[in-house]
Amino acid sequence: MRSLLIALTTLLLVSCGGNGNSKDDQFLPDANGRHGEILLLLDDNLWNSRVGEILESNLNKHPEGPYLRPEPMFNYFRKKPDDLNHMNKLNRNILKVMVDHDSTYATTAVLERPNYYAKNQLFVIIKDSDVNRLYEFLLNDFDVIADLFNDFELKQYMRYYKEEINDNVNEMAQKRFGISITIPSESTLEKEKDGFAWVKRERSQNLIGNQANKTEGGTFWIQQGILFWSQKYDSASQFTFDGVLQSRDTVLKYNVPGKVKGSYMATEYDPGYKPEGREFDFKGYPTYEVRGLWKHAGHRGAFGGGPFVQYTIHNKAKKELITVCGYVYAPKFDKREYIREIDAMLQSIEVIK
């Protein structure tokens, strides 16, 4: 929500729940639709203008972090407002962009309406009386809107995982690493030893083949993993970008073997996909976030890789660094939503004082 805090000083942001009456939310139907997909509501004049062009350009931007192949920030489909029907109204994410000819605005207005037509739905309206100012907002401040939908999607995953929490993994994390974490119940504990643990979540998904682009169809496995490790904090150099990566590479080499004998998980440092890091405050604790790609190293025959997100949390009271790393292996599929799921798990972490 970094952009949101800045942009709130220059635009009107209004939030109201469930048609303005939160007491009625319990009677609303459940939202549906795919995660990461937005229903756009624009009339033909706007959609076929530069407003529609910049809106598409923003939605097609790549999500944060290195990816092996380009993916859009959001999937989307467009309807004219007059064509909105009962089924469309239940879509999980709805964004309406309009010119309001009946009012006069000093600045572009953004109305955030959670649970408007359905429970667990986010409906956002962007409107202005000046089409040129509307375009300028989409050109310069669309990050505000992207942050709203990204934050909403994270909360939806977190809500679901909280209802289906893996108590065994959470108890292990509390006992060994001094943190609680919400991980889906179908996850399994692959490895546990002093200062390290490895949790796997595996599932299958069908993929329809496409002869035109030679895409193979079938049922394929998807793996998400959560790695935990801890170390004593002895030097400031440990809590730097280079220090965090050095610790990561050492831990992975000795604890996360690949299927080919002698291979192990490693970090991709190719200039085109090198990891990205930032230090930020996470619930009151200095934390280093790293986003990048993992690969298998140690043997020519080793293959496989994908994106990862990693938090290294500095618990000053205990003079300890706790790292939680989530990774994805899904070679046949886009990774955006799987990484969003990882983000939700990491965001659920609470440090036990």
Image (cartoon, rainbow, N blue to C red):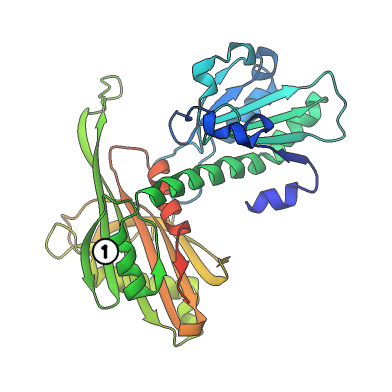
In the rendering, at what x and y percent does residue 192 appear? Answer: 22, 70
As rendered, which of 348 and 209 lies closer to the eye? 348
Residue 274 appears in the figure: no
Q: Choose top left, top right, bottom left or bottom right for residue 80.
A: top right
As rendered, which of 7 and 263 lies closer to the eye? 7
As rendered, which of 240 and 101 lies closer to the eye? 101
In the rendering, at what x and y percent does residue 37 appear? Answer: 48, 31
Q: Residues within 10 Å of mark 1 (few under 14, many from 20)?
A: many
Residue at image point 41% right, 42% down: 337
Residue at image point 80% right, 48% down: 9
> Which residue is outermost to the bottom?
234
Residue 40 appears in the figure: yes
In the rendering, at what x and y percent does residue 302 appear? Answer: 18, 55
- Left or right of residue 11, residue 67 in this image: left
The kind of secondary structure element at disc 1 is strand
Q: Give the tally of numbered discs.
A: 1
In the rendering, at what x and y percent does residue 270 appear? Answer: 39, 57
Residue at image point 51% right, 82% down: 316
Q: Choose top left, top right, bottom left or bottom right for residue 257.
A: bottom left
Q: Choose top left, top right, bottom left or bottom right for residue 59.
A: top right
Please state which amino acid type lies under the numbered disc 1.
Trp
Residue at image point 41% right, 55% down: 345
Residue 304 drawn above or below residue 232: above
Residue 111 drawn above or below residue 320: above
- Left or right of residue 6, residue 59 in this image: left
- Left or right of residue 22, residue 120 in this image: left
As rendered, which of 169 and 77 lies closer to the eye? 169
User: Mark 1 = which residue?
Assistant: 198
Residue 22 drawn above or below residue 67: above
